[in-house]
Amino acid sequence: MKRTVLALILLEAAAHAGGLGRPNGISARGVGMGGAWTAWVDDATAVWFNPAALSEVDPQVDVGAELVVGPRTFTPVADDGTRGPAQNATVVAPVPSLGVVGRFWYDGQPSRFTLGGGVWNTFGGKVAFPKTGMPALDAVQDAVVEASAGTAVRVSDRLSIGAAFRIGIGLFSVEGTQMPYDASLSAKGLGVAMAWGFLFRPVETVRIGAAWRAPLRITTTGNGTIEGASGTEQVSVEHQQNWPQSASLGVGIAASPALKLAVQLDWTQWSTVKDLIVQLPGSGNPDQVYREDWEDSWTARVGADLAVTRAIAVRGGLYYDTTAVPDRTIERQYLDSNKVGLAAGGSYRFGAWRVDAALDAVLPSTRTVPQNTATTPDYDRAKAPGDYRGTLITFEASVARSF
């Protein structure tokens, strides 16, 4: 029975790799530019994208929300090469966010220091497949909600630096049917990390922005139940979430007073995740080590922002995001492949208020993992060969009030 619990947790834990890491999100303004936002970020999400850019943000309060929709299909391939029935699921996740920016004043003048803070979901999510009564993982979650606070210092008219303190709230849960028992498990935890940012303006029309976010490690603890032959059994669970370090480098160019352009390169170090370790405290079982061997992912972005009038702006963007999950370890919980995304958005200002909206779509794709059981050693065989199809659509909206 204990080993059944471990199997459920281990399969779920894999779900927080690049397959559930959204390639674009958090800011309605940034999403509209395809995520090419490190150099131009001008809302409270600067705390995440580039803390140094807080020096360019007017004092304001931002309230926003994302709606993430991700339909996906997995068609398994058996050892003899035959394909089984398609397994379908759709991720539907409303994700609220909140941010605030304020500036110190000294002797009636704004100082060189700017403060900012916010709450948003940065990694992970939840996937639920329809229950069929057959042995399966029905719902899995591995996610983090970050509460961050940061500051920027305008060192000179050309240079700003910034830092942010991040508190991660880790969320973990899994529900399974007949594996061979019904199970419902959940756990939560806290972790801390830092982020650093840099913004340089060599000339008035050019910005160079860079940011680094440290790894965020969260130990989640909790409990759950298993319905076995002898009835309901209570179990304790401990699961380590290892969210990777990441870095961004962006260049922004003001091509005209109305048009801003941006290019950006992002890196996420998923390659540090070699193993996933799960413990059952007090069970007498040794730690369970699950090989993953993920790979670093890279994202290239381009974006544009055009001020049509003083009140109206439109945006557009394009990005290419590489997979973090190799063929050997991918499973149906993932939506991960080499992805192309398109984004568009806009803003409307009236008085001290601003409304932003954006739509981002990862183009539909199919990833085929071949059945290699007969030709490959055990350690290198694919866990779940088959066809992985899906897309990811994100709707963004926010309202900001400047002060």
Image (cartoon, grey):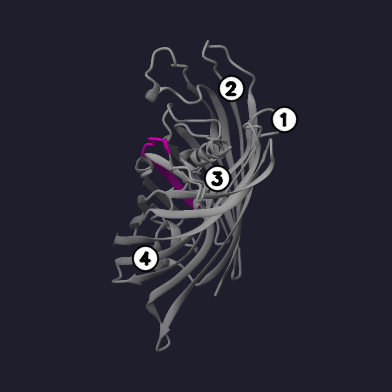
Q: Secondary structure at mark 3?
A: strand
Front-most of 214 and 114? 214
Secondary structure of residue under mark 1: loop
Task: Name the disc covering residue 163, or none.
Answer: 4
Q: Is residue 297 magenta?
A: yes
The local crowd at label 1, few if under 14, some if 14 to 19, many if 20 or more residues have their Cα within 10 Å, is: few
Given residues 91 and 224, the one toward you in this image is: 224
Q: Which residue is mark 1?
A: 133
Figure quadrant of residue 62? bottom right
* Mark earlier in primary sequence (1, 2): 2
Q: Which residues are magenta?
A: 289-307
Nearer the observer: mark 1 or 2; the answer is 1
* Amino acid at circle 3: Ala
In the picture, which quadrant includes the C terminus? Answer: bottom right
Question: Toward the viewer: 118 or 249?
Answer: 118
Residue at (42% x, 66% y) in the render:
54
Residue at figure coordinates x 47%, y 22% from the top left:
369
Residue beneath disc 3? 344
Q: CA distance from mark 2 to mark 3?
A: 32 Å
Element on which disc 2 rests: strand
Disc 1 to disc 2, C-alpha distance = 18 Å
Indicate the position of residue 131 as horizontal and vertical percent values: 70, 33
Using the image as rendered, state which of residue 27 and residue 288 is in the foreground: 288
Give the image quarter of residue 312: bottom right
Q: Residue at the location (49% across, 39% down)?
A: 14
The span from disc 3 to disc 1 (Cα, nearest Å) is 41 Å
Q: In the image, is residue 211 part of the stretch drawn in magenta?
A: no
Q: Earlier in the sequence, mark 4 or mark 3?
A: 4
Residue identifier under label 2: 75
The answer to the question of whether label 1 and label 2 lie on touching residues, with beta carbons closer than 8 A, is no
